[in-house]
Amino acid sequence: MNDFAGLTAALLEFRDARDWRQFHSLRNLITSLNLEAAELLELTQWKSDAEIDALPAEAKSAEALRDECADILLYLLLIADTAGIDLAEAARAKLLKNAAKYPVDQAYGSRAKYTELGTATKSR
Amino acid sequence: MNDFAGLTAALLEFRDARDWRQFHSLRNLITSLNLEAAELLELTQWKSDAEIDALPAEAKSAEALRDECADILLYLLLIADTAGIDLAEAARAKLLKNAAKYPVDQAYGSRAKYTELGTATKSR
Amino acid sequence: MNDFAGLTAALLEFRDARDWRQFHSLRNLITSLNLEAAELLELTQWKSDAEIDALPAEAKSAEALRDECADILLYLLLIADTAGIDLAEAARAKLLKNAAKYPVDQAYGSRAKYTELGTATKSR
Amino acid sequence: MNDFAGLTAALLEFRDARDWRQFHSLRNLITSLNLEAAELLELTQWKSDAEIDALPAEAKSAEALRDECADILLYLLLIADTAGIDLAEAARAKLLKNAAKYPVDQAYGSRAKYTELGTATKSR
């Protein structure tokens, strides 16, 4: 039930019950996802790394984190549905691409971008 | 395999093979998710609504959309794992909250924010 | 010469020489400003606070900071010109608003948002 | 008075009266600028291009635009002050770089990125 297909079905039912498909252009959904990402970022504003790491242990902050992550996922599912993307499949494929860009022997313990690893063949 | 748990397992294996956990503070992951969201937004830059709607039908643009959506999902899974969030459960719970904030009879066919619907009891 | 009006004049000349006014809808300019803000944020990605504080002392990083700040300012000037905003005047007026929201005696040495200071009369 | 130096002086006085310098690390300022940029973007959410173009003509929306643009400028001035950037000079220099990347004869009436113009010598 709680896989991508199940969630998407519940989400589309929510959307269509409100006749909101008309507002969900790809542009609007992508803009809205960015706004939700910013709300997640706002939870870190003015905080030290240690304070941010402690957020999940505090009930109200944990709920805020959960809600913002959920909002991002919901818009991502709407974008995927609108653009005809199989999200789980796309993530698997991207992980393979990343594995090629960041070979273990070169990327181990390094923050360097792949363009600095000597494995890059094109700009991002 | 391609549910949230399966994807997260593959992702953590990718991360740990490279010893990257040390870089994945909640702050860094949230910042990175915002950067990936911006890369998705960049795909819409200077384009009309019609041009954006046409992106999924063009092979190279479709791949770019797929890759950026995948990157966002991957960071979201890392954030959820780090913060102890059950992402699918959080999305279900948020959908219920949204249903309360946007009752069908008041939200039908409307873009109004819930704070304008007369159902708001708290700030977002 | 290097005040807001002088910069805006140089910028509009640059724009009109290329016949770019047609692309500079308020939406496009605001989206582009967000993308430039993200490029500035990217300069902090994966870095510690100390490493970020050290960026201005390193020539190449300093130039990157300078360029991204410039890009943000340029889009801000275009938005202000398009929306009929006197940017310097708007900043002065906002500073007065902020002074009212954050009275010195309550805000001194505090990161609290004005909504937590007991001075709030409306949501942000 | 309302040039960059005058505004920065007023802003630093506002900051120091509240003892806020301690919170204004480069990271915090850059994060905050991104959040303000998102608030500006939020003013376009769910709106058509025509509705966005009409925002400046409506008093309340015009004020919101003005305030968000002001917030972005204020953070940009703080970043510039912290990083030792002469903002007006940086904008002039960037405009020259952009002029080289987008020669009039190739960029006239075109939305193409400079990397597609055949003038690119390096990635952005």
Image: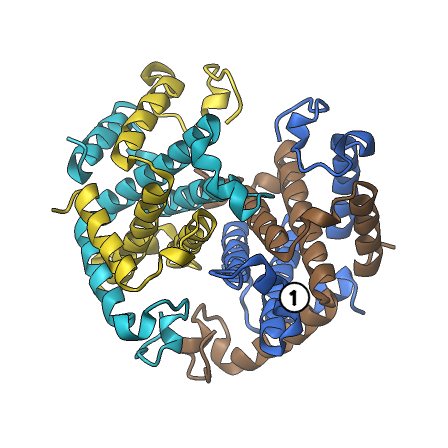
Chain colours: A yellow, B cyan, C brown, D blue
Quarter of image, res D100: top right
Number of numbered discs visible in the structure rendering = 1
The quadrant where residue A55 appears: bottom left
Front residue of D66 and D81: D66
Q: Would you say residue A62 is visible in this rendering? A: no
Q: Is residue D89 left or right of residue B108?
A: right
> Which chain does the numbered disc 1 sit on?
D
Q: Foreground: D67 or B12? A: D67
Observer-nearest of D7 and C38 = C38
**D2 left or right of C118?**
right
User: Which image quarter holds the N terminus of chain D?
Assistant: bottom right
Q: Mark 1 highlights which residue?
A: D12
- Local crowd at mark 1 within 10 Å, few (<14), some, or many (≥20)? some
Residue drawn at x 74%, y 41% as measured from the top left: D94
Residue C11 showing in the rendered view: yes
Residue drawn at (44%, 42%), measured in percent from left and top? Answer: C48
Q: Quadrant of the C terminus of chain D?
A: top right
- Position of residue B74 in the picture relative to residue B112 (left or right): left
Residue D28, above or below B75: below
